[in-house]
Each structure stands twice: as structure tokens, then as C-alpha cells.
């Protein structure tokens, strides 16, 4: 186990840690219940730095949850909600 040098908002809850295809890089799924925002923080434990942050606000009309699925071939993972499949390496929607 290793430590992370960051501070989270007191309203934030870490709900999941997802490994990536890259060694010592993890994606941390954080939900801010007050603001209804889901964040995916990509953290590099070798450098102890944030690589990128992806955030999505929950919409009241959503019928499907928000999920992280595992990537392949040295890519980061994918964020899936009702509307988009987003590549967490580039934070760009794929479809």
C-alpha cells in the first residue's frame, strides 16, 4: 500500500478504486453528494501526482447509473453513463 498526497472536499466520498493497464496508476471514483458530481481522478503513485481529472454532473432524468469499465492495451479505463462512452485517457467522448 502507498500513500496519496492530496486533499478531498469534506463532502466527497471515494466509492471505488479502479486499476489501469499502467503500473502504479489508479483511477479513483469520487462522488460529491451535495453537488451531485462524479469525479474520476487518475493518480500516478510513482510520481505522486494527479494525471487528469474527469467530472460529470448527475442529471435528474438519468435512467442508467455511471460506471467505469476496464481498458486494454495500455489505455486508461472508460466512463459510461446514459449518454456517452468517454475515454479516460483523453477525457473525450467516443460515442
Image: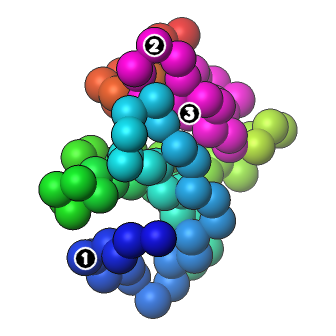
Badge 2 element: loop
Q: Give the side of residue 5 with respect to residue 87, left or right.
A: left
Q: Give the side of residue 20 with respect to residue 42, left or right.
A: right
Q: Residues within 10 Å of mark 1 (few under 14, many from 20)?
A: few
Q: Quadrant of the C terminus?
A: top right
Disc 2: which residue: 73
Q: Earlier in the sequence, mark 2 or mark 1?
A: 1
Q: Residues within 10 Å of mark 3 (few under 14, many from 20)?
A: many
Q: Is residue 85 magenta?
A: yes
Q: In this orientation, which residue lies closer to the viewer: 4 or 62?
A: 4
Residue 48's place in the image compared with 65, above or below, is below
Q: Give the residue furthest to the right.
A: 63
How far is mark 1 from mark 3, CA to CA?
Answer: 24 Å
Instruction: Please provide percent x and percent y for residue 75.
Output: 41, 21
Disc 1: which residue: 5
Task: Please name the residue shown 45% across and 89% down the image.
Answer: 10
* Magenta segment boundaries in residue numbering: 66-86
The answer to whether residue 35 is seen in the rendering is no
Q: In this orientation, which residue lies closer to the viewer: 46 or 57?
A: 46
Q: Earlier in the sequence, mark 2 or mark 3?
A: 2
Badge 3 element: strand
Residue 92's place in the image compared with 88, above or below, is above
Disc 3: which residue: 79
Instruction: Please provide percent x and percent y for residue 90.
Output: 30, 25
Instruction: Please provide percent x and percent y for residue 3.
Output: 35, 76
How far is mark 2 from mark 1, CA to CA?
Answer: 28 Å
Q: Is residue 63 magenta?
A: no
How far is mark 2 from mark 3, CA to CA?
Answer: 17 Å
In this rendering, the label closer to the viewer, 2 or 3 = 2
Colour scheme of this structure image? rainbow
Q: Give the side of residue 14 with respect to residue 91, left or right.
A: right
Amino acid at each position: 500500500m502507498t500513500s496519496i498526497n492530496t486533499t478531498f472536499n469534506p463532502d466527497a466520498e471515494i466509492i471505488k478504486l479502479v486499476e489501469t493497464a499502467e503500473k502504479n496508476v489508479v483511477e479513483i471514483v469520487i462522488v460529491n453528494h451535495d453537488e451531485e458530481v462524479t469525479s474520476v481522478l487518475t493518480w500516478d503513485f510513482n510520481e505522486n501526482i494527479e494525471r487528469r481529472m474527469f467530472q460529470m454532473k448527475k442529471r435528474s432524468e438519468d435512467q442508467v447509473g455511471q460506471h467505469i469499465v476496464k481498458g486494454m492495451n495500455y489505455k486508461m479505463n472508460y466512463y459510461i453513463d446514459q449518454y456517452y462512452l468517454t475515454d479516460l485517457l483523453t477525457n473525450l467522448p467516443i460515442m
